[in-house]
Image (cartoon, coloured by chain):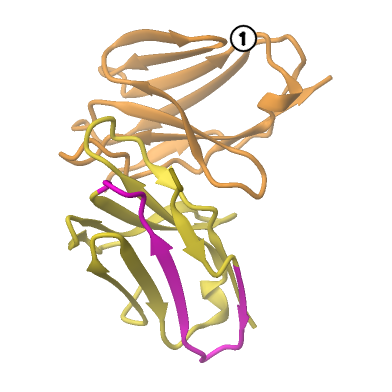
Chain colours: A yellow, B orange
Amino acid sequence: DAGVIQSPRHEVTEMGQEVTLRCKLISGHNSLFWYRQTMMRGLELLIYFNNNVPIDDSGMPEDRFSAKMPNASFSTLKIQPSEPRDSAVYFCASSGQITGELFFGEGSRLTVL
Amino acid sequence: QKEVEQNSGPLSVPEGAIASLNCTYSDRVSQSFFWYRQYSGKSPELIMSIYSNGDKEDGRFTAQLNKASQYVSLLIRDSQPSDSATYLCAPLANQAGTALIFGKGTTLSVSS
C-alpha cells in the first residue's frame, strides 16, 4: 500500500506569496494531522481532522494559515501571505483508529525568502 | 497546557552500550505513550508504544512507564550506529488513541 503522499517535497518562495501544501492519506485512514517541525520548536501540531471534520486547530499560528479536507483522502494546508518565519518542514500524518499509530509523509520543506 | 519534556542531547554512547532516553509529561490524563524515531532528513516512525505501568520489551528496545511520576523512558540495549537518530516521545492525548503532542526529541549518537 502507498504511504502518506505529500507535495511538493521542496518549496522556495518569496515573502508575501501564497503557499499550498498537499497531502493524500493512506486508504482507510480517517484521521489527518498537519505538523510543523523546526529546530527551535520541534514538532508542533497545527491542526487535525477526524472523518473530514476539523477537531482542533488551536495550533494554527494565525489567520494566514488555513487547512481543508475536501474529501476523505486529501487535504491542503495554505499559507497566505507567507513570511520568512514560516520556513520549516511541514509533515502530514494519517491514522486509523485501531493502533493509534501515526504514519507520516516525507514532509514538505518550505523556505520563505 | 500539555507539555512533554525531553533532554535534547546529544546523547553519545559507544557501540554495544545501553542508551537511556527519558521523557516527562505534564498532562495527568495521558494514559499511553509512543516512541518515534526520526533519522536526519526523514520523517518520524513509530518504534514502541506502551499503555500500562511497567516495562514493555521489543527486541533491543524496552519502554518503561510510570504514570504516578508522569515519566516514561526508552532503553536501547546493544546500541548500534544505525540507532543514531532523534527519538521523540508522545503521549496519547485524544479519544481516538492517536499521539498528538511530541517532545522536542533526544538526539542519540552511537559511535563505532
- Which of the 4 quarters of the picture holds residue B7? top right
Q: Is residue B84 above or below residue B2?
A: above
- Image position, residue B1 (x, y; %): 26, 48
Instruction: Assign a secondary structure to mark 1.
Output: loop
Q: Is residue B19 above or below residue A14?
A: above
The amino acid marked with disc number 1 is Arg
Crowding at dot 1, Cα within 10 Å, few <14 / some 14-19 / many 20+, comes out as some
Q: Is residue A93 above or below residue B28?
A: below
The verdict on residue A14 being magenta is yes
- Image position, residue B18 (x, y; %): 64, 11
Q: Would you say A46 lies left or right of B14 here?
A: left
The residue sitting at 71% across, 26% down in the picture is B82
The verdict on residue B15 being magenta is no
Q: Is residue B61 above or below residue B47?
A: above
- Image position, residue B102 (x, y; %): 41, 42
Q: Which residue lies under the disc numbered 1?
A: B77
The residue sitting at 25% across, 63% down in the picture is A58
Magenta extent: A10-29
Q: How many marks?
A: 1
- Which of the 4 quarters of the picture holds residue A57? bottom left
- Image position, residue A2 (x, y; %): 45, 48
Quarter of the C terminus of chain B within the rendering: top right
